[in-house]
Amino acid sequence: MEAAWVALGLSLKVALWATAIDLVLGVAAGFALARHRFPGRELVDSVLLLPMVLPPTVLGYYLLVVIGRRGWLGGWLERSFGIHLIFTWQGAVIAAAIVAFPFVCKSARAAFENVDAQLEQAAKVLGLGPAAVFFRVTLPLAWRGILAGVLLAFARALGEFGATLMVAGSIPGKTQTLSIAVYEAVQAGQDELANGLVLLTSATCVAILLLAGRLAPARIPGRS
Amino acid sequence: MTPRRILRTALTGLMLAAAMAPALAAELTVSTAASLTNAFREIGQAFEAAHPGTPVRFNFAASGALLQQIAQGAPVDVFASADMETMDQAEQRRLVRPADRAVFARNALVVVVPSDAAVVPKSLAELAAPAFRRVAIGVPASVPVGRYARAVLEKAGLWPAIEAKAVGAQSVRQALDYVARGEVDAGFVYATDAAVLPGKVRLAFTVPTDAPVLYPIAPVAAGANPAGAQQFVAYVLSPAGQAILAKHGFAAP
């Protein structure tokens, strides 16, 4: 079972990094989509939500082609900085961040759209700058919705399997996350290990969902 | 719907299912080691041409994964493994009968590098050098090619050095793909796999193994189509089947 705890630690590390990245990018993208009208806005929104509907293998393949050693970005990173993303935990973070991104972006957009624009107007009239309006009025009013999205993103990142297997491989202690460890244990017929791993994964995910439900009770259908 | 209509619909459904049952029974599912992918696709076509009415469906994966599927009750008629050990396990778990087993092909373990590799290793000791940062190896727990490689490396005292930079692959074909994409500096595959992507991978050297790389085949004891399974195994062992295997680089056992 020691392998299970190593895998859990790695999964948490990957999911935390991925969620932190999504928090920054997802809130920025959600805010831009909620507050700014520009041509092609709904198209951008659809493209940003793609990771939610595309099969993880498709995302994994895109990633291999882009950040692989022979991909345009991966090749440039390797030549310029000696950075190699495939088969590293950082590669797993990128895969998890992409699949979990829509959860933050979508929740943030909805949360920002629910903030009464008149309150922001009033703050502006009272002399607050745009940054102050965002951090002192908009964000405090939207944070619950954003947080629920962030927790779901974390759960999704924790459970990420397909794209991660394609770009990060399965290196015990380095890139072998919980979901990949489960897959390998089942393939090798190690049922005891698989049992421990799935219970650990299920318990972690239930804890996250309970937390998400508590933070935004009204937003989860069937609970209000 | 009235009860009578429900009954009529249900009966029609049952009759349809009954009519389709014989067609389904004739179908043959063959779980095949990943390294046999190209050769068995061709054998399947030739077999179907020789036995019209018995369509063959293949399930390609690492032998260990296939064994687990059969052990869990997957509806499989024939099992072809890339090593004796996996078939021995199938026999111990009474998934195949000892008398039904036959060895039908032999292969060799090789090390391949990407075709544009700057350095080509000539021995296992060279592969252990720091110049080779990542080496693809099938996960030894379920992938035979990984088990052959580990046994050789352990005997040479090089396993700790290679294991530290090993990238686990879920089948021999995934290891081959990692090498072909240049994501790893070298990989352990079979000689026949190296020949599948000639423009993308280059053969570095052949690795002598203590145990020969043999491929056993057997009908699955619980298979739904035992007659078809026998016919398929016989076809693989026949001169026609052996010719196709030879064409794909497999040696006779």
Image: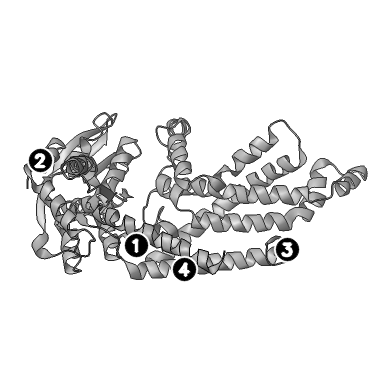
Residue with the mark numbered 3: A218
Labels 2, 3: one chain: no
Estimate how packed mark 3 is, as few (under 14), some (14 to 19) or many (20 or more) residues with alpha carbons within 10 Å: few
User: Which residue lies under the disc numbered 1?
Assistant: A186
> For this rendering, which residue is in front, B147 or A17?
B147
Earlier in the chain: of badge 1 and badge 3, it is: 1
Measure how far apart labels 1 and 3 are at the Cα level.
39 Å
Disc 1 crowd, CA 10 A, few/some/many (<14, 14-19, 20+): many
In the displayed structure, does residue A50 sit left or right of residue B236? Answer: right
| Disc 1 chain ID | A
Q: Quadrant of the N terminus of chain B?
A: bottom right
- Could you tell me how far apart the alpha carbons at marks 4 and 2 are, in whole angstroms? 52 Å
Amino acid marked by disc 1: Val
Residue drawn at x 30%, y 61% as measured from the top left: B74
Q: Secondary structure at mark 1?
A: helix
Q: Are marks 4 and 1 on the same chain?
A: yes
Residue at x 79%, y 55% (from the top left corner): A141
